[in-house]
Amino acid sequence: MPADIVDAVTAVLVCDGDVFLLRRQPYLAAFPGYDAFPGGKVEPGESEQPHSEPLLQCVPPQFLHALIRELWEELSFDLHAALDVDDVIAITALGAAQSPAFVPKRFNTHFFQIELRRQPAFVLDENEIEQSRWRKPAYWLQAYENGDLLLAPPTLAVLQALAQGVDCRPDLSFPQLRDPERIPQFEAVHGVRHFFVRSNTLPPADRTNCFLLGDDDQKRILVDPSPNGREELERLCQQAGAIGFDEVFLTHHHHDHRQYANEIARRFNVPIGMSADTESRINAREPRFLDGLCIKNYAGNDVITYWHSQALRLHAVPGHDEGQLALMPDGREFCIVGDLIQGIGTVVIAAPEGDMSRYFSTLESIIALNPRVIYPSHGPALGGVFYLQQALKHRREREAQILALCDAGNSLEEMLTKIYKNVDPRLLPLARMNITSHLAKLRSEGAIT
């Protein structure tokens, strides 16, 4: 197993047909805000002492001790005590699911179903768990299909298997996420088809999120297609084309959100949508890029299509890019925010299209709307707005640091050296842009001259 993959365990607790599901806190590093089963990573040095209890023989010792520890830490549930009083009917190994290579934090998660005679009185670890419930698998699947749950693929696969009956076992191999000839694709939120497309973007990211949205009886839009080359283009056209779409839509004008988008629109004979500002900036950078295409201009508050019969509305989110538009259903179940935040890497605010003051205001406005799930431009979905809050907090702290250095007489280059001591040298020009944008904001506010 590759060194960057960490073993983890998960307990699928079942009682009288009900399944226990919890919602992880939105500030956790792994799967923030996801609906999941209890569990966690296997710690280094986890005991490998075998257990004499017959029901536990299916669990390798190091995984068993991690499972016992995690259940106690998260739920104050003592598996030993439950076995002693015959509250455990059976423990079954369901298999293991390994995170694909494009995910920043990778796990090899071992799933164990624990069937109980009665529902324990859990005491939740509120540092890790926001809420929890026991419900039938059919209830959880309906909640997912309603767009109310944020699920990793293995969690969904287990719930689907449980709904089919006791003899059904989930397939946790997910070859479609590892096939080099396919673009990884899944729906963490039902109806949000998410493609992790290889793109020519800024490191450390190497993929840009592309989405296919729209109810079956409504216009379907392909958002931010930007494959990095001909082979990836063909993969995206094959997979998205098999589902079907009626329009290409660009959140903003940057190249890593639109490479080959014009060719895709021509190939499928569909219009391409964007803000008027995005159109003007593309024309300024690549005058022939949009030649011969039907252009549809949108603005904030426009309805572009429908998701689960709700209006999927556009929101103006300037700051990183003046013409950037986000997509969010009126129920605020999710928000595709473009480069307002990046799940991998840091957002660059650079003139002329970037403005730090507007970036601050936009972060504040989306945080106030409080969508349930945030889709960044790079990386997996995030539950809640915590990482938007962190981005705003970080920018405020950076601005205070820059103001202090400026008041002390430091030049821009001296600030760059002092603030970004251990940064990859390739990223220093981008860091310089962010400092410059902070200085422009401070000047506009009269904090510096």
Image: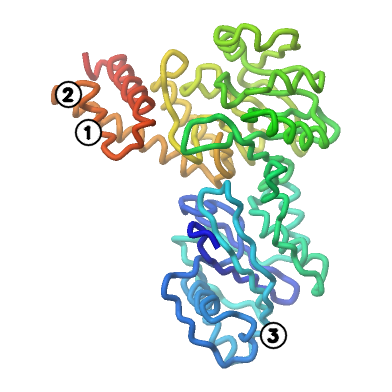
- Residue under numbered circle 2: 410
- The span from disc 1 to disc 2 (Cα, nearest Å) is 10 Å
Q: How many marks?
A: 3
Mark before the other along the chain sequence, 3 or 1:
3
The answer to whether marks 3 and 1 mark residues whose Cβ atoms lie closer than 8 Å is: no
Q: Is residue 312 above or below residue 372?
A: above
Q: Residues within 10 Å of mark 1 (few under 14, many from 20)?
A: few
Amino acid residing under circle 3:
Ile
Q: Quadrant of residue 273?
A: top right
Residue lying at 46% horizontally and 22% vertically, measured from the top left = 319
The answer to whether marks 1 and 2 mark residues whose Cβ atoms lie closer than 8 Å is: yes
* Disc number lying in front (3 or 1): 1
Residue farthest toward the right in the current orientation of the protein: 217
Residue 65 spot, x, y in % from top left: 50, 79
SS for dot 3: strand
- The span from disc 3 to disc 2 (Cα, nearest Å) is 68 Å
Amino acid residing under circle 2:
Asn
Rendered image: mark on residue 89? 3
* Disc number lying in front (3 or 2): 2
Quadrant occupied by the N terminus? bottom right
Residue lying at 43% horizontally and 39% vertically, measured from the top left = 389
SS for dot 1: helix
Rendered image: mark on residue 418? 1
